[in-house]
C-alpha cells in the first residue's frame, strides 16, 4: 500500500496548536451576561438601583417636605393626601421614608470602602509575609472578634459621640478584621502556588508580588466579601441610629425614626412600619445581589 | 419497577457488554460529546484494559457502567449489559442490589475515597452487613480475613484505625478488601495506582495479580499507563477523544499496533536505554483535542501521519484487523510501515564538562521546631559541571524537591555550603543579585499553577525578560520575547492569550521560555513533564534536549520516572529519605552492580515489553516516617538484600562500582555483581 | 489532646487579659468627670473632688487597673455609680436572664436552621432547595429591630396574641413561649440564613465527595449513606458556626432586649455605657467576653472530639 507523502518525512512535533481549550475564566463581557442571567442578581439589582436613585434624587421625588412639622395632622392613618400617613409631629411618612434612604446609603458604602481597603491591605501583608506579624495581628483580630460587633460599636460610639463621621469610622474599623480574615485565607492559598515561587525567583519585590501577582487572583472572594459587608454595614448603621448612638434628629434616617416612633406603635403603627419595610427591602436587595454575584463567580 | 430489557446478542457469553455507548456533558449551555459509539465486551474472568490520555473518556466509561455519572451528563445512546440487565435502564433498586455485591469499584485516590470520620473496620463490615446480612461480630471476622487476603499486616489493629492513619498502599488494600468482600462478578479499577509511589505501585499490582487467582471477577482496568495495562490485562482497548480506536489481545496489540495513534503512543514513551544523543523522541504532532471535540471524519486525522482525504470525510467504522482485533482505521494495514523519527539528534558539545558550575557540600535541611525535627535533606554533596545534565531520582520523601528549593533559594538551608559559578550561595532568592538570578532558574511541575492565570503570556515573558537583563530598551525586550517564543515553538497568536486558554503542553513551553529569558547557565527542572500526557511529554523532552544543547545549559532534572531521566541525563543521582545513595553516569546507574534500592526501582517499573517474573525485586515494609528515621542504613527496613546487624547499626560507606559510579551500601560491588541479575540495555 | 486543651485555655486567658486591658483603657476614656456626672452640675468643685477621691478615680491609670482587675478576679466588682447596688448582683442577674432568652432562642433556631439546610442540600437544585436558599439568603443582616417591630406590630398590637414587652418567664413552659417567642423571632431571622447556608454547604460538599461515592457504589441504602456517612462530616463546620452564634445570643442581644424591654445583659451594657456607669460597664463587658471565650473553648473541644483527624494526630 502506498503511503502518503507526509508519512515519509520526519515529524518533529512542531505543530502544537493546543488552543481553544475549555477555559476556566470567562471574559468581561460574558461575566456581565452571566450576571444578567441570574434571577437573584437582577431582582436585587432593580430594587437596589431604585433606592440609590431615590437616595440621590429624593428632593425631586418627595410629595412633601420631610421636615415640615404640621401639628394639626399628627398621627393620621394613611389616606390619599398622605399615602403612608403622618407621624407624631405631623410630618408626611412617605416623604420621610423616601428621604431616609440618603443617610443609610451614604454611611454604609463609605464604611464598607473603609473596611475593605483596610482589610485587604492587612490581609495581603499578613497573609503573604506571615511570621510574627501574622501571629500578633491574628491574635488581635481574634480578641476583637471575641465580642459581638454591637458591643464594640456601642462602646466606641459612647466615647466618640454620635455623628455621621464617627459611625463611618467605627463601622469601617470594626469591619477591617472580618475582611482581613477572608483576604488572608485567600492569600494563604495563592502564595503556595508555583507562580508565586516563580515570581520570587525572578526577583520581584514583595509589594509587586502582593499587588500585581496575587491580588488579581483573589478578586472574586473580595468582590463577594464587599457585597456581604455592605449588607452588614447597613445593618450596623441602622442599629446604631436605633440605639440613638448614630445620626441625630431631625434626620429622617430609618433607624432613628423607628426608635422614636416606637412609643406610638399601638396607635400609629404606620410611622414605624413603613421605614422598617423600606430598610428590609434594601437589605434583602443587597443580599440578593451578593448571592447572585457569588453564584456567577463560583461557577 | 421495570422489566429487564431483553438480551441483545450473546450476553450470556460475556460478563459485561457495552454497545454503542455515547455520553455527553452539558457545560454552560453547550453539549460536549465525551463518548462516541463505544463498544466492547469483557469475558468472564478476563481483565480488559482501557487506555487513553486525559480527556479520552475512560473514566466516563467506568462511571457509566456503575451508573454514577455527573448530574450534567446525558447518555445519548447505547446499552450496558450485565447479568441479563441493561444497566442504563435499571431501576435504582436493582442498581442498589448489584452495587457492592455483583459489581464493585476501586478508585484512584484511596485517601479521599474513604470516609475520614469512620473507622476502616466499620467501612468494610458495612458491606458484609448489608449484602450478606451478617451480624456485627461475624462481619468483623470476615473483614479481618479479607484484610489478610490483601496482605495487610495486623488486620485486627487496622480495623480499628481511621483512614488518615494508614499509608497510601494500605488504604488501597482496604479498598480492595471492600470491593472483593462479596466476590463480585465485575471489578472496575479506575487508575488504582496513579498517585502511589513506584515501589508501592508495584506491590499493589502484584496484589491484584494474586487476588485474581483467588477471585474470578472480570476486571475493567482503566489506566493511562501502557506498561501497567500490558502487564495486567489480557485484552486492551485504546480510547482517543471518546472513540475506541483499536482493541485486541494486549500482547499482540502492543507488539503490532493497528492504529496510528497506538503506534504513536508506544513510540513516544521513553524507556531506560534511550538516550538523547541517539535520536529525539518520537512525538505525536499537534495536541490532544479539547473536550467534546467532534470531527467530520476520523477524529485522529488531524495528527495522523497516514491520513488521506477519505479519513477526513468519513468516520471509520470498527473494522476487523486480525484475530480478535478491531481498528477504526481505513488503512490499518499500513500502520506497521510508518517510519520512526530519524531526524538528527540534539548535538551536545563534548562529553567532558570541565568547569564545575555547581558545588554542593554537606547540605542539610530540617523542618520542625523544638519538639521534633524532620530531616528533609541530610548531608548531600554533589557537583554539576557546566552544560551537564544531572538527573535526580527518588520517590516521595526522598528530599529531591527540597534539595532543588534549597539550591534555588526558595527555602533556607539548615547547614552546608553551595558554590555556584565560583561564588558562595547562601541567601534566599529574594536577596540575590540579578546576575545570579538570571543564571539560575527553575521550571516547575504543574503548568496550571506555575503561570499566573491573570496575566497574558506576553506579560509573563516581558516581566521575566525585564528582570533578568540590564538596561534593555522596550524594543529590545519585545524582540527578546519573540525570540524566546520561537525557541519554544510558540506561535505569535499564543502570546496574547492567558494561560487558561492554553493546553498543558503549551503552558509548559511558556514556563520554559520564562526560565530561559535570561540565558541561564543552570535550569532546575522539578518534574517538568509529570503532569503532562505521554504524547505531549515527548515533545517537551525533545525541546528541553534541544535547548540544553544549543544554549549549553546545565540541568538539574528531577523526576520519579526512570525512563524520562535516563533519556535526558548525563549523570544520575538516586535519593532515598533525604540522602544521596547512588550517583554515576546515566548509562551505568541503571545496570548492576548498583544500590539495592535502584535495583528495586527498576524492577518495579512496568514496561510494555513485559518483564521476566523471576527478576522482580519487591520491597517489604512501608516507607519509614521521616520524623523517625531508621538507624544505620536508612534503607535497611525495606532492603531485599539486608545483611544483618551491620546494616542496622552502621551507616554504609561509599563503594565504587565503576568509573565515577558510587553507591552507599555495606555490600561490596563484587558481591553485588554476583547476586544482582544482569539486565540488558534496551535501545 | 490534653496538651491541646491546655494550650487553648492558656490562649483564651491571655486573650482575656488583653481584652481587659483594652476595655479598661477604653472605659477610662469615656468623656466627662465621674464625680461631676454623679453629683450633677450644681455641686461644688470641692464636693466633686471629694467624691472622685472617694471613688479612687484620681489615682494613676495602672494602679486603677490593677485594683480593678484583682478585684474582678476575686469576685469583688464594686458598686454601681448610678444604682448604688453591688455590681455583681446586678450583672449576674442580668446574665442569667440573657442566658434564658438565648438558650430558648438557641433551642428553637439551631435545629430548625440545620434541618432546613440539610433538607435543601438533599434536594439540591430542586424548588425546595431554591426556596429555602432564597429565603435564607434574603434575611441575612436584617436588623433585629426591623423584624422585631414588624412582629410586634402584627402579633402584639394587631392580633394581641402575645405581650409587647417580655418579662423573665416563670418555670411554666407555656409562659416561656408567651414571653420569649416574640423576641426570638428576630434572632431567628438573623441566624437562620447563616446557619442553614453553612449546613447546606457542608452537606453538599459531603454529598459530592469521593467517600460518599464509595458508599453509594457499595450499594448501601440511601438512609445509611445520609445518616452514617454524609451528616457526620457535613455538620462539623456547622458546629463552629453555631458556637460563635451562641456567644452572640448571650451578649449581643442589645437591640432585642431594648425593643422588648427585656432585662438582659446587653441592655445593661448599653445603659451603663450611655450613663457612664464605669464599674458596671467594665464588669459587664468583661463578663461577656469571658462567657464568649468559654463558649468558643467548648466548641473547640467539641469539634476536636468529633473530628478523628485532629483527635488522633500527635
Image (cartoon, coloured by chain):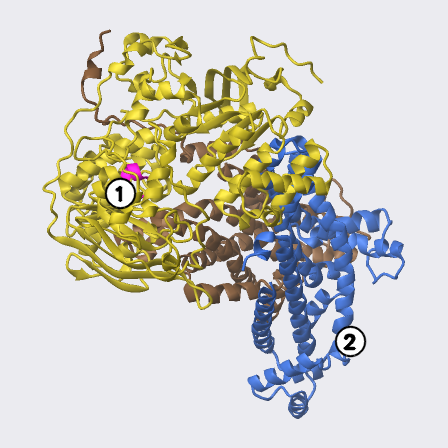
Q: Is residue C277 above or below residue B199?
A: below
- Vertical order, B357 against B91 (above or below): below
Q: Quadrant of the C terminus of chain C?
A: bottom right
Please give the residue where the numbered disc 1 appears in the rendered image: B592
Place of residue B192 in the rendered image (x, y in percent of width and height, measured from the top left): 48, 35
Q: Where residue B276 sits: x, y (%)?
A: 20, 35
Cα–Cα gap, marks 2 and 1? 86 Å
- In the rendered picture, chain A carries what hue? brown
* Residue B430 coordinates in the image, percent (x, y): 28, 58
Residues beneath discs 2 and 1 located on the same chain? no
Q: Horizontally, is A271 left or right of B506 in the view?
A: right
Rendered residue at 72%/69% (across/down):
C268
Looking at the image, residue C225 lies above or below residue A111? above
Q: Tell me, yes or no, whether the highlighted magenta stretch contains residue B562.
A: yes
For the N terminus of chain C, which image quadrant? bottom right
Residue B49 in the magenta stretch? The answer is: no
Residue A291 found in image quarter: top right
Residue at point 22% right, 48% down?
A: B584
Q: Nearer the viewer, residue B492 or B375?
A: B375
| Residue B482 in view of the camera | no
Question: Is disc 2 surrounded by few (<14), some (14 to 19) or many (20+) residues within 10 Å?
Answer: few
Q: Does residue B285 appear anywhere in the picture?
A: yes
Which range is magenta?
B559-565
Chain to which mark 1 belongs:
B
Residue B593 in percent (x, y) is at 26, 45
Q: Residues within 10 Å of mark 1 (few under 14, many from 20)?
A: many
| Chain coloured blue in the rendered structure | C
Give SS at disc 1: loop
The mark found on residue C89 in the picture is 2
SS class, disc 2: helix
- Using residue A160 as the reference point, say whether residue C275 is left or right of it: right
Which hue is chain B drawn in? Answer: yellow
Amino acid at each position: 500500500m502506498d503511503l502518503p507523502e507526509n508519512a515519509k518525512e520526519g515529524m518533529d512535533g512542531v505543530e502544537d496548536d493546543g488552543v481553544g481549550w475549555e477555559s476556566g475564566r470567562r471574559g468581561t463581557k460574558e461575566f456581565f451576561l452571566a450576571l444578567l442571567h441570574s434571577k437573584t442578581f437582577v431582582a436585587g439589582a432593580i430594587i437596589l438601583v431604585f433606592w440609590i436613585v431615590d437616595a440621590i434624587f429624593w428632593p425631586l421625588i418627595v410629595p412633601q417636605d420631610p421636615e415640615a412639622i404640621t401639628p394639626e395632622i399628627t398621627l393620621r392613618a394613611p389616606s390619599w393626601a398622605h399615602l403612608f400617613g403622618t407621624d407624631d409631629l405631623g410630618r408626611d411618612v412617605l416623604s420621610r421614608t423616601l428621604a431616609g434612604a440618603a443617610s443609610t446609603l451614604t454611611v454604609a458604602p463609605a464604611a464598607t470602602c473603609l473596611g475593605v481597603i483596610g482589610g485587604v491591605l492587612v490581609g495581603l501583608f499578613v497573609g503573604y509575609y506571615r511570621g510574627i506579624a501574622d501571629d500578633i495581628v491574628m491574635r488581635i483580630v481574634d480578641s476583637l472578634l471575641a465580642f459581638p460587633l454591637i458591643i464594640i460599636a456601642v462602646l466606641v460610639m459612647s466615647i466618640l459621640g454620635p455623628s455621621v463621621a464617627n459611625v463611618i469610622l467605627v463601622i469601617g474599623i470594626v469591619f477591617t478584621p472580618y475582611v482581613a480574615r477572608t483576604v488572608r485565607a485567600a492569600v494563604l492559598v495563592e502564595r503556595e502556588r508555583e507562580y508565586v515561587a516563580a515570581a520570587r525567583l525572578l526577583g520581584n519585590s514583595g509589594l509587586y508580588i502582593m499587588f500585581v501577582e496575587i491580588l488579581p487572583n483573589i478578586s472574586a472572594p473580595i468582590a463577594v466579601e464587599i457585597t456581604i459587608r455592605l449588607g452588614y454595614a447597613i445593618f450596623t448603621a441602622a442599629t446604631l441610629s436605633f440605639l440613638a448612638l448614630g445620626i441625630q434628629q431631625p434626620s429622617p434616617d430609618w433607624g432613628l425614626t423607628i426608635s422614636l416612633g416606637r412609643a406610638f406603635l399601638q396607635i400609629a403603627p404606620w410611622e414605624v412600619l413603613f421605614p422598617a419595610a423600606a430598610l428590609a427591602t434594601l437589605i434583602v436587595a443587597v443580599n440578593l445581589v451578593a448571592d447572585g454575584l457569588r453564584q456567577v463567580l463560583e461557577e | 419497577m421495570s422489566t429487564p430489557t431483553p438480551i441483545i446478542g450473546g450476553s450470556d457469553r460475556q460478563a459485561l457488554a457495552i454497545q454503542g455507548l455515547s455520553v455527553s456533558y452539558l457545560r454552560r449551555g453547550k453539549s460536549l460529546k465525551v463518548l462516541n459509539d463505544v463498544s466492547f465486551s469483557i469475558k468472564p474472568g478476563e481483565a480488559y484494559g482501557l487506555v487513553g490520555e486525559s480527556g479520552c473518556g475512560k473514566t466516563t466509561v467506568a462511571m457509566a457502567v456503575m451508573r454514577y455519572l455527573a448530574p450534567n451528563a446525558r447518555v445519548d445512546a447505547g446499552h450496558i449489559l450485565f447479568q441479563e440487565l441493561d444497566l442504563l435502564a435499571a431501576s435504582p433498586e436493582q442498581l442498589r442490589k448489584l452495587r457492592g455485591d455483583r459489581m464493585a469499584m476501586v478508585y484512584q485516590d484511596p485517601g479521599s475515597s474513604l470516609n475520614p470520620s469512620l473507622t476502616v473496620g466499620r467501612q468494610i463490615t458495612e458491606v458484609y452487613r448489608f449484602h450478606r446480612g451478617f451480624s456485627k461480630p461475624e462481619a468483623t471476622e470476615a473483614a479481618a480475613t479479607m484484610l489478610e487476603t490483601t496482605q495487610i499486616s495486623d488486620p485486627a489493629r487496622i480495623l480499628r484505625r481511621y483512614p488518615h492513619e494508614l499509608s497510601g498502599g494500605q488504604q488501597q488494600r482496604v479498598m480492595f478488601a471492600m470491593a472483593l468482600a462479596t466476590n463480585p462478578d465485575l471489578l472496575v479499577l479506575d487508575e488504582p495506582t496513579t498517585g502511589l509511589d513506584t515501589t508501592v505501585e508495584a506491590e499493589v499490582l502484584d496484589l491484584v495479580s494474586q487476588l485474581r487467582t483467588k477471585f474470578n471477577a472480570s476486571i475493567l482496568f482503566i489506566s493511562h499507563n501502557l506498561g501497567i495495562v500490558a502487564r495486567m490485562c489480557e485484552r486492551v482497548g485504546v480510547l482517543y477523544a471518546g472513540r475506541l480506536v483499536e482493541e485486541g489481545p494486549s500482547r499482540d496489540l502492543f507488539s503490532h499496533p493497528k492504529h496510528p495513534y497506538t503506534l504513536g503512543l508506544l513510540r513516544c514513551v521513553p524507556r531506560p536505554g534511550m538516550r538523547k544523543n541517539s535520536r529525539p523522541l518520537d512525538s505525536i504532532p499537534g495536541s490532544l483535542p479539547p473536550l467534546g471535540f467532534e470531527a467530520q471524519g476520523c477524529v485522529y486525522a488531524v495528527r495522523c501521519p497516514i491520513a488521506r482525504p477519505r479519513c477526513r470525510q468519513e468516520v471509520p467504522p470498527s473494522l476487523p484487523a486480525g484475530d480478535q482485533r478491531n481498528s477504526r482505521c481505513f488503512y490499518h494495514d499500513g500502520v506497521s510501515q510508518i517510519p520512526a523519527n530519524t531526524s538528527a539528534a540534539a548535538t551536545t558539545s563534548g562529553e567532558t564538562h570541565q568547569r564545575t558550575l555547581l558545588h554542593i557540600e554537606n547540605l542539610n535541611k530540617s523542618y520542625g521546631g523544638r519538639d521534633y525535627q524532620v530531616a528533609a535533606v541530610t548531608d548531600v554533596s554533589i557537583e554539576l559541571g557546566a552544560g551537564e545534565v544531572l538527573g535526580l531520582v527518588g520517590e516521595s520523601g526522598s528530599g529531591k524537591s527540597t534539595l532543588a528549593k534549597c539550591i534555588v533559594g526558595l527555602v533556607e538551608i539548615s547547614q552546608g555550603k553551595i558554590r555556584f559559578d565560583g561564588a558562595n550561595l547562601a541567601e534566599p532568592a529574594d536577596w540575590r543579585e540579578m546576575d545570579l538570578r538570571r543564571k539560575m532558574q527553575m521550571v516547575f511541575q504543574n503548568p496550571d499553577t506555575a503561570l499566573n492565570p491573570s496575566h497574558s503570556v506576553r506579560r509573563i515573558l516581558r516581566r521575566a525578560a525585564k528582570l533578568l537583563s540590564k538596561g534593555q530598551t522596550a524594543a529590545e525586550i519585545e524582540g527578546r520575547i519573540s525570540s524566546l517564543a520561537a525557541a519554544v515553538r510558540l506561535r505569535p497568536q499564543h502570546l496574547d492569550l492567558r494561560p487558561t486558554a492554553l493546553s498543558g503542553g503549551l503552558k509548559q513551553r511558556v514556563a520554559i521560555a520564562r526560565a530561559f529569558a535570561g540565558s541561564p547557565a543552570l535550569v532546575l527542572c522539578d518534574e517538568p513533564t509529570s503532569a503532562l500526557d505521554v504524547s505531549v511529554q515527548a515533545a517537551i523532552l525533545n525541546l528541553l534536549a534541544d535547548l540544553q544543547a544549543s544554549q549549553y545549559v546545565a540541568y538539574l532534572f528531577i523526576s520519579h520516572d526512570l525512563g524520562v531521566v535516563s533519556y535526558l541525563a548525563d549523570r544520575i543521582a538516586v535519593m532515598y529519605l533525604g540522602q544521596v545513595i547512588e550517583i554515576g553516569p546515566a548509562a551505568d546507574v541503571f545496570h548492576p552492580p548498583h544500590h539495592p534500592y535502584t535495583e528495586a526501582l527498576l524492577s518495579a517499573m512496568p514496561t510494555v515489553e513485559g518483564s521476566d517474573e523471576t527478576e522482580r525485586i519487591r520491597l517489604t515494609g512501608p516507607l519509614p516516617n521521616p520524623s523517625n528515621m531508621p538507624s544505620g542504613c536508612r534503607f535497611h527496613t525495606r532492603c531485599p538484600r539486608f545483611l544483618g546487624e551491620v546494616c542496622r547499626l552502621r551507616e554504609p560507606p561509599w563503594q565504587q562500582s565503576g568509573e565515577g559510579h558510587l553507591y552507599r551500601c555495606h555490600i561490596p560491588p563484587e558481591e553485588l555483581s554476583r547476586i544482582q541479575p544482569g539486565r540488558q540495555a534496551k535501545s | 489532646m490534653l496538651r491541646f486543651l491546655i494550650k487553648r485555655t492558656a490562649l483564651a486567658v491571655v486573650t482575656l487579659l488583653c481584652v481587659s486591658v483594652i476595655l479598661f483603657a477604653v472605659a477610662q476614656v469615656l468623656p466627662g468627670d465621674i464625680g461631676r456626672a454623679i453629683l450633677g452640675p450644681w455641686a461644688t468643685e470641692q464636693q466633686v473632688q471629694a467624691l472622685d477621691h472617694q471613688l479612687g478615680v484620681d489615682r494613676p491609670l495602672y494602679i486603677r487597673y490593677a485594683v480593678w482587675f484583682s478585684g474582678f478576679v476575686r469576685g469583688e466588682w464594686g458598686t454601681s455609680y448610678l444604682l448604688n447596688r453591688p455590681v455583681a448582683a446586678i450583672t449576674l442577674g442580668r446574665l442569667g436572664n440573657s442566658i434564658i432568652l438565648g438558650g430558648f432562642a438557641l433551642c428553637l433556631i439551631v435545629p430548625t436552621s440545620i434541618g432546613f439546610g440539610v433538607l435543601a442540600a438533599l434536594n439540591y437544585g430542586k424548588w425546595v432547595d431554591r426556596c429555602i436558599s432564597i429565603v435564607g439568603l434574603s434575611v441575612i443582616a436584617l436588623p433585629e429591630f426591623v423584624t422585631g417591630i414588624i412582629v410586634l406590630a402584627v402579633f402584639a398590637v394587631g392580633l394581641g396574641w402575645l405581650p409587647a414587652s417580655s418579662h423573665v418567664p416563670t418555670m411554666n413552659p407555656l409562659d416561656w413561649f408567651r414571653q420569649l417567642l416574640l423576641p426570638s423571632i428576630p434572632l431567628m431571622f438573623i441566624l437562620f440564613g447563616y446557619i442553614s447556608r453553612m449546613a447546606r454547604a457542608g452537606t453538599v460538599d459531603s454529598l459530592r465527595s469521593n467517600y460518599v461515592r464509595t458508599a453509594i457504589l457499595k450499594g448501601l441504602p440511601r438512609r445509611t449513606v445520609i445518616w452514617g456517612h454524609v451528616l457526620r462530616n457535613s455538620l462539623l463546620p456547622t458546629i463552629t458556626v453555631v458556637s460563635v452564634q451562641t456567644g452572640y445570643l448571650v451578649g449581643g442581644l442589645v437591640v432585642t432586649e431594648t425593643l422588648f424591654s427585656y432585662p438582659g445583659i446587653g441592655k445593661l451594657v448599653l445603659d451603663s455605657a450611655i450613663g457612664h456607669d464605669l464599674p458596671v460597664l467594665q464588669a459587664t463587658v468583661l463578663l461577656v467576653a469571658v462567657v464568649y471565650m468559654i463558649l468558643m473553648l467548648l466548641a473547640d473541644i467539641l469539634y476536636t472530639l468529633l473530628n478523628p483527624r485532629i483527635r488522633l494526630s500527635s
